[in-house]
Amino acid sequence: MANSLPHPQNRQPVSHIRGLAISGAFAAAVMALSLSGVGCSGTPAPEGGTGQPTSAPVMPTKPSPQVNAQKFVYGHQHPRQHGYLVTPKKLSPAKKIPLVVFFHGGGWQEKSTARSAAPVVNDLAQHGVAVWNVEYRGVTLNAKDAPGGWPMTYNDVAAAIDFIPQLAHESRIPLDISNVVVAGYSAGGNLSTWACSRPALPAKAPGAAPKFRVDKCVGIAGVYDMHLAFRQHDKFVRTLLGGTPRQVPQRYFEASPADNVNDKARIVVLHGKNDKTVNADEVKYFMARARAHGLSIETVLLDDAEHYSWSKPEGPQWKAARKAILQQIHTETNP
């Protein structure tokens, strides 16, 4: 892999990207799986953050996941500003457990929800960590009647991260918020690594100057450079950011973790070498930009990982991602 790469604006696209949407058949399968996990339905949480405990509906042929869930509201501008704290049922009394913040994928689309991440979130929790499964405002392809986009989607990510101290205060389960990892898949890979890049953002950028800093992150099949994604015909990026790189260049810069490298971050990215939805060039460019800042990004490139295979908890791709997340829990941040 080369030590440096030209900026994607000066490069030819390697392959055509079809975007990050979940196909209809796959979405139906994920929704069915998610019924065995933590859904996004339930009584809205009252002011102050804490909601009622959420019981996970169970498919008749699936064993009940050994997790508990509680809904919290991290903002009051829109109903999507909430998430679920998912924790193992079996815990040592009074022992604080590490926290993983998880951002779901789905092309930053309003129709995609935290429900789709329930299977892997439940799997993580059953391995001894708490998971803050975050919902956020999304967009539509026609850019109409959707609450998300720039900067709202990224403001939600920042707000959900900055809410962590209050989450710990209100949680029934003791959380070790000195040990937090942020992770996400596909669009969530962009959002999770962006959350780690916040200390490096320009002073007036959305999400800059975080109230709560997270320096350990795992990106899974993510988009790290928005210019590259646009050039490779990702149909969602233009809608998300409200224009082309020529029209809104600052937004493309501020939404790209590869252009805002936090030199204290510990970053792991996992990707399929033959991913036809998000090209592996995203990883190469991210690595090159990180090296330019003196930061080494750990990469895991799999030969047998299609874009949607990471969301299946029984598959080897998710098991590799889970291993990376749990290893980050036990890793110190850069000095």
Image (cartoon, grey):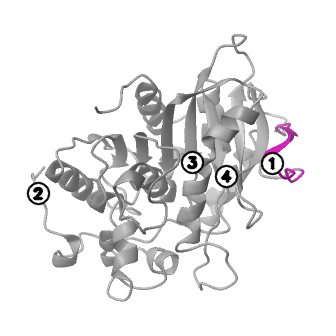
Tag in front: 2 or 3: 3
Query: Which residue is at 17% across, 74% downward?
Result: 11
What is the three-letter code of the residue carrying label 4? Ala
Query: The C terminus appears in which quarter of the rendering?
Result: top left
Query: Cα distance, mark 2 to mark 3?
Result: 32 Å
User: Which residue bears the numbered disc 4?
Assistant: 114
Q: Viewer-proximal residue, 299 or 145?
A: 145
* Residue interval drawn in magenta: 43-56
- Local secondary structure at mark 4: helix
The residues tagged by marks 4 and 2 sit, at their Cα atoms, a distance apart of 36 Å
Numbered disc 1: secondary structure? loop
Mark 4–mark 3 Cα distance, whole angstroms, equals 16 Å
Residue at disc 2, secondary structure? loop
The amino acid sitting under disc 3 is Ile
Residue at the image position 26 percent from the left and 55 percent from the top: 286
Type of the residue with mark 1:
Gly
Tag of residue 161: 3
Callout 2 amino acid? Ser
What residue did someone put label 2 on? 4
Q: What secondary structure is found at the residue carrying circle 3?
A: helix
For marks 1 and 4, the one nearer the N-term is 1
Q: Quadrant of residue 200?
A: bottom left
* Distance of label 2 from label 1 (alpha carbons): 48 Å
> Rounded to the nearest whole Å, what is the CA distance between mark 1 and mark 4?
21 Å
Residue 79's spot in the image, x, y percent?
77, 63
**Type of secondary structure dominating the magenta stretch:** loop
Q: Earlier in the sequence, mark 3 or mark 1?
A: 1
Are dots 1 and 4 in contact, CB under 8 Å? no
